[in-house]
């Protein structure tokens, strides 16, 4: 995995606009520092932090999985001052990944019909490719927040952890593949005492073809992400999804009465 993604505290894979001024990583005047912690036998966390003279605190967390070639980034901004921050815009986790002549694998997510969750590949190229869901508040409408880059006999699995309107830019450069992930329509102030966070970015490197990448992702997901109960994987469960009720939006009109009625109808 390219070292530009975790070289040093002033070269972090983070870029943002604060009051119209572009900043990258942690500026020297923010007095950046670094701490390390052992989260578990399989996970270490390196945290880079600093604070502007006006009281805007920035904390960037990088978790590294020791049993898989995986790193996970997320950044937090906290206003520790007495007044609102300047306008915060275009907050991105971004950097270069090794590899050339990349093929991008991606999906269309949920289209609410049988054509949804399709998966296809296409050459990446030097022109910026922007991938984002439709601006309806969900994270996978017409675009899936899981991507795969294949570059020769190796590649990267990419996951954007955000439940809303995310955006991703990718393009090939002379030095590798540029990747940029952020929240769409980010234009705000942070009030005193408030904290905001970026989408998270998970990067997994692998050797082999697209199938090898999919299998490695599956193994990591089962080992670290999928919920467990008393240390065991959850058994299959039966649930009733009674979505649109009357004039209510999806999932907003449920009552004990109509859920029981739906189950009675389904099983009789």
Image (cartoon, rainbow, N blue to C red):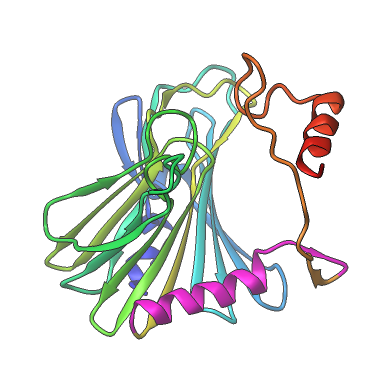
Q: How many marks?
A: 0
Q: Is residue 118 magenta?
A: no
Q: Is residue 218 magenta?
A: yes
Rendered residue at 44%/28% (across/down): 136
Relative to 202, is 66 above or below?
A: below
* 221, 256: nearer the viewer: 256
Q: Residue furthest front?
A: 268
Residue 124, visible in the rendered structure = yes
Q: From the image, which quarter does the N terminus lie in?
A: bottom left
Residue 69, visible in the rendered structure = no
Relative to 221, is 80 above or below?
A: above
Q: Is residue 241 left or right of residue 268?
A: left
Q: From the image, which quarter does the C terminus lie in?
A: top right
Rendered residue at 17%/49% (across/down): 128
Relative to 161, is 212 above or below?
A: below
Q: Is residue 220 left or right of residue 214?
A: right
Prevalent SS, magenta region: helix
Give coordinates of residue 132: x percent, y percent. 35, 42
Q: Is residue 141 left or right of residue 50?
A: left
Rendered residue at 38%/39% (across/down): 133
Rendered residue at 62%/14% (across/down): 247
Quarter of the figure with residue 240: top right
* 19, 134: nearer the viewer: 134
Give coordinates of residue 179: x percent, y percent. 30, 56
* 98, 16: nearer the viewer: 98
Give coordinates of residue 213: x percent, y percent. 42, 77
Q: Residue furthest top?
A: 247
Q: Which residues are magenta?
A: 209-230
């Amino acid at each position: 995995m390219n070292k530009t993604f975790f070289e040093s505290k002033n070269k972090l894979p983070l870029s943002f606009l604060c009051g119209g001024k572009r900043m990258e990583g942690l500026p020297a005047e923010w007095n950046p520092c670094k701490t390390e912690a052992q989260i578990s036998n399989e996970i270490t966390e390196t945290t880079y932090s600093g604070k502007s003279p006006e009281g805007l605190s920035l904390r960037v967390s990088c978790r590294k999985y020791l049993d898989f070639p995986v790193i996970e980034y997320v950044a937090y901004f906290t206003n520790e001052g007495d007044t609102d921050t300047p306008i915060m815009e275009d907050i991105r986790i971004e950097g270069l990944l090794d590899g050339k002549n990349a093929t991008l694998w991606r999906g269309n997510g949920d289209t609410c019909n049988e054509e949804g969750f399709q998966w296809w590949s296409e050459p990446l190229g030097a022109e910026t490719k922007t991938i984002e869901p439709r601006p309806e508040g969900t994270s996978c409408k017409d675009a899936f927040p899981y991507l795969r880059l294949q570059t020769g006999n190796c590649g990267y699995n990419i996951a954007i952890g955000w439940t809303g309107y995310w955006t991703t830019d990718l393009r090939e450069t002379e030095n590798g593949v540029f990747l940029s992930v952020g929240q769409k329509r980010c234009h705000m102030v942070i009030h005193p005492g408030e904290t905001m966070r970026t989408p998270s970015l998970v990067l997994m490197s692998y050797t082999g073809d697209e199938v090898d990448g999919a299998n490695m992702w599956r193994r990591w997901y089962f080992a670290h992400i999928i919920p467990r109960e008393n240390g065991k994987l959850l058994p299959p469960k039966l649930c009733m999804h009674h979505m649109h009720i009357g004039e209510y939006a999806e999932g907003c009109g449920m009552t004990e009465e109509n859920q029981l009625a739906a189950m009675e109808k389904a099983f009789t």
